[in-house]
Image (cartoon, grey):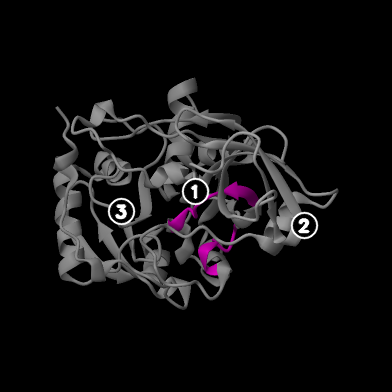
Amino acid sequence: MLRKSDFYYDLPEERIAQTPIYPRDHSRLMQLDRRTGAITHRHFYDIVDLLEPGDVLVVNDSRVLPARLYGQKSDTGAKGEVLLLKQLGPVTRWECLVKPGRKLKTGVRLTFGEGLLTGEITEVRDDGNRVISFDCKDEDFYNLLDQIGQMPLPHYIHEELEDSERYQTVYARERGSAAAPTAGLHFTDELLQTLRDKGIIIASVTLHVGLGTFRPVKEENVLEHKMHTEHYVIPQETVDIIERCKAEGHRVISVGTTSTRTLESCYQKNGKLMAFSDDTDIFIYPGYEFGVIDGLITNFHLPESTLIMLVSALAGRENVLHAYRVAVEEEYRFYSFGDAMFIL
């Protein structure tokens, strides 16, 4: 049995990064050889030296929505908080988390931004999430979010973020995530150009990250864990780039677990990589045979999380846990605003 406790490591709270590093590419980088477990300490800008001409970096170009809304009940003025999780068809219909749940029931109407946006709870789902239909009075919904919404930082970050763009990758384009694909936060425009100048190819996929990525594994038997579902898109251009890369004997490096889940989901479902749009609940843990990626750039993840299980599937559980122990000893910064690991 694969046990949740097999992926535990001890992390002092002070190792959890509360603020991003500036410049982005000056974070630390742990290089991990997934075959030998050998570790090398570097900085993220050294990634240029670790990649070869013809290699492909696959990034997730999803953009985080300012998805946290503070409003009032239209009838009583009582405060309510809404967190957008997933778009359901029309851009104004969303699955959401709400607070306080006991008072926000079906039929309740909410007002946000002094009336710029209103919403009605139309459904309470079995898991407690609400479906809300919004009315933005002919204004663009996303523009209104930019005006009145707040960035939904992870629960373990307690510092306020002075510049909301620091929780976006520099290549973020497609709006829809409730959390950032954080492995990409280390890249700058200048670093990406340096990589291109060396002959490294940047390809994009889109996976809209849900808050389920932070949902803990509660079952001791890992195989009983039910994964969250996220929507992804793979364009034909990216498929062509990866196929050419493989044919020429180069390497496909995934930037982040979200890009990994996107590529591997498509491969598992279709037996090959293809232009595709779908929802995925793929759960990658040790024993998984990767079909697309050769390496991974990622951050340091929570103990016993599905993310550390994915990383362990690629590099081996013992190698990963040893690397994490070294990272703690060497005072690496952990989680979303933390340092990075390059597994190859």
Q: Position of residue 257 (x, y in %)?
A: 40, 46
Left or right of 197, for residue 246:
left
Q: Between 61 and 281, which is closer to the camera in this rendering?
A: 281
Q: Is residue 175 magenta?
A: yes
Q: Between 90 and 41, which is closer to the camera in this rendering?
A: 90
Label ID, residue 100: 1
Which amino acid type is shown beneath numbered disc 1?
Pro
Per the model, the C-alpha gap separating discs 1 and 2 is 22 Å
Label ID, residue 301: 3
Quarter holding the N terminus? top left
| Vertical relation: 161 (above or below) 315 | below
Q: What range is drawn magenta here?
A: 166-182
Upstream in sequence: badge 3 or badge 1? 1
Which amino acid type is shown beneath numbered disc 2?
Leu
Label 1: state its secondary structure: loop
Q: Position of residue 97 (x, y in %)?
A: 51, 44
Per the model, the C-alpha gap separating discs 3 and 1 is 29 Å
Q: Residues within 10 Å of mark 2 (few under 14, many from 20)?
A: some
Residue identified by numbered label 2? 116
Q: Between 340 and 245, which is closer to the camera in this rendering?
A: 340
